[in-house]
Amino acid sequence: MTQANAEFRAGLPDTLRRLGQAGAGFDPVAPSAALAAELQSLLHALAGAAVTFGFRELGQGARALEQRLRVLTAFEHVGADDWRALLASLDDFVRGGLAAPQPAYHSAAFSLLP
């Protein structure tokens, strides 16, 4: 389990970059269902793995984003401002994670709550 935890930790920057790239490619005016599904999948996997390996705040942040995304995708029509708000939160999540030293992966650097 220690090796799996170390591998998870080592892979976090790449995972966060993939999330950031998916978010950067998302058009809030004409949202792609396929890209929304990809974001949902990445967030879901990250949330589950983070909790498994003891990265509570990281997992909570990813889960909160995933849940917001699920709500938005449940509606037929969503305004561009709602999508932009989600993408801004995703950007903050990714940027905070990439800028933080590794021990901060366990910290509030990933918290989306005030």
Image (cartoon, rainbow, N blue to C red):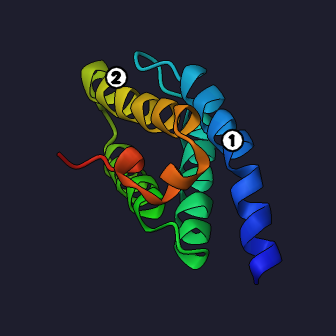
Would you identify the image quadrant in which residue 50 lies? bottom right
* Residue most extreme to the bottom: 1
Task: Find residue 90 and report its horizontal and vertical position in percent.
Answer: 44, 35
Would you identify the image quadrant in which residue 19 lies? top right
The residue under the point 59% across, 30% down is 20
Q: Looking at the image, how many numbered discs can be counted on the residues?
A: 2
The residue wearing badge 2 is 84
Q: Are marks 1 and 2 in contact (CB under 8 Å)?
A: no
The residue under the point 52% across, 63% down is 47
Q: In the depicted view, which residue is nearer to us: 56 or 45?
A: 56
For numbered disc 1, what is the local secondary structure?
helix
The earlier-in-sequence mark between 1 and 2 is: 1
> Which residue type does callout 1 highlight?
Pro
Residue 48, compared with residue 83, is above or below; it is below
Residue 92, compared with residue 103, is above or below; it is above
> Which residue type does callout 2 highlight?
Arg
For numbered disc 2, what is the local secondary structure?
helix
Would you identify the image quadrant in which residue 39 lies? top right
How many residues crowd mark 1 within 10 Å: few (<14), some (14–19), many (20+)? some
Q: Please name which of the two marks, 1 or 2, marks the residue nearer to the observer.
A: 1
Task: Find residue 57 and report its horizontal and vertical position in percent.
Answer: 40, 61
Q: In the depicted view, which residue is nearer to us: 93 or 100?
A: 100
The residue wearing badge 1 is 13
The residue under the point 72% across, 62% down is 8
Q: Is residue 81 left or right of residue 47?
A: left
Q: Is residue 42 left or right of residue 60?
A: right
Residue 103, compared with residue 52, is above or below; it is above
Q: Quadrant of the N terminus?
A: bottom right
How many residues crowd mark 2 within 10 Å: few (<14), some (14–19), many (20+)? some
In space, the residues marked 1 and 2 are separated at their CA atoms by: 23 Å
Task: Find residue 114 and report its horizontal and vertical position in percent.
Answer: 17, 45
Residue 43, compared with residue 100, is above or below; it is below
